[in-house]
Image: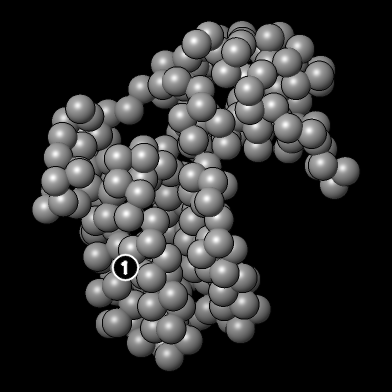
Amino acid sequence: MTTKQQMMQIKVAQRIDQTAHEYVREQLRGAILRVDIDSGARLVQADIAYWLEVSTTPVREALRDLAAEGLIVLHNHRGGSVRDLNWEEMQEILLIRQQIEELAVTLGVERITETELGRADMLCELMANEPDVGTWVDMNRRFHIVLHEAMRSPQLIEIVRRLEESAAIFIAQAQRRNPDIREKANDHHLALLDAYRRRDAAAALAIQAEHLLLPVDMTDPAHRGLRSGR
């Protein structure tokens, strides 16, 4: 199937509350995370603008955002391509996260507000009932960003946010290989929120350590080959 055919299949109506930039970004992000658009597929600005019935300006802005999230690679301002997955990169993300997680979780547990807990709780509820992989993965990213922002440490927030966004496409692909990951992740989210509410950093850290391993859990036969990208 060509990229054009894939794009035509995933197109949905723009919401009233969306800017054209947001509309294009959400359409492309969802399609990439669901793997409706193949890994390595070219994303040409003019073609996307035509298919989604917008100008090239919001397409250019959306592609820039998706490149910052690590979902695509830009090509000299003419467009880009969906990033090819290399599971060694996910291993590197995991290694870095493991080194900084104690500080991140400790700060978050100490400083999170009731408003932030409420936002995270709402996302948990939505994820529990969300059938679409792309939408779930984006909600998962937003859930963890709420917890990260509670750290009140701009430099650390930026580091963890970038790692979280870079891992999104791997999390989506892991779910396609083993859908049970989503249910386990939802359980972890509820347990994390409970630990954050109780201000129990040790419990939150133990849950988060297990949670980080879900996409690359080599003890599950459905995950064999993930580290090498097979």
What amino acid is at disc 1? Gln
Residue 16 location in percent, x, y?
Answer: 88, 43
Residue 53 position (above or below residue 87):
above
Left or right: residue 207 compared with residue 147? left
Q: How many marks?
A: 1
Determine the image quadrant of residue 45. top right
Determine crowd level at label 1: few under 14, some 14-19, many 20+ residues with C-alpha closer than 10 A. some
Secondary structure under tag 1 reads helix
Determine the image quadrant of residue 59. top right
Q: Which residue is mark 1?
A: 208
Residue 159 position (above or below residue 19):
below
Determine the image quadrant of residue 160. bottom left
Coloring applied to the structure: one colour
Of all residues, the one furthest to the bottom in this rendering is: 198
Seen from the viewer's position, the closer of residues 31 and 129 is 129
Residue 125 position (above or below residue 75):
below
Residue 36 seen in the figure: yes
Name the residue at 81% across, 21% down.
54
Seen from the viewer's position, the closer of residues 187 and 19 is 187
Residue 27 location in percent, x, y?
Answer: 65, 32
- Looking at the rendering, in which quadrant would you find the C terminus? top left
Seen from the viewer's position, the closer of residues 201 and 3 is 3
Residue 224 position (above or below residue 136):
above
Residue 105 location in percent, x, y?
Answer: 37, 72
Residue 183 location in percent, x, y?
Answer: 38, 62
Name the residue at 22% across, 29% down.
229
Residue 163 seen in the figure: no
Name the residue at 80% across, 36% down.
14
Seen from the viewer's position, the closer of residues 59 and 17 is 17
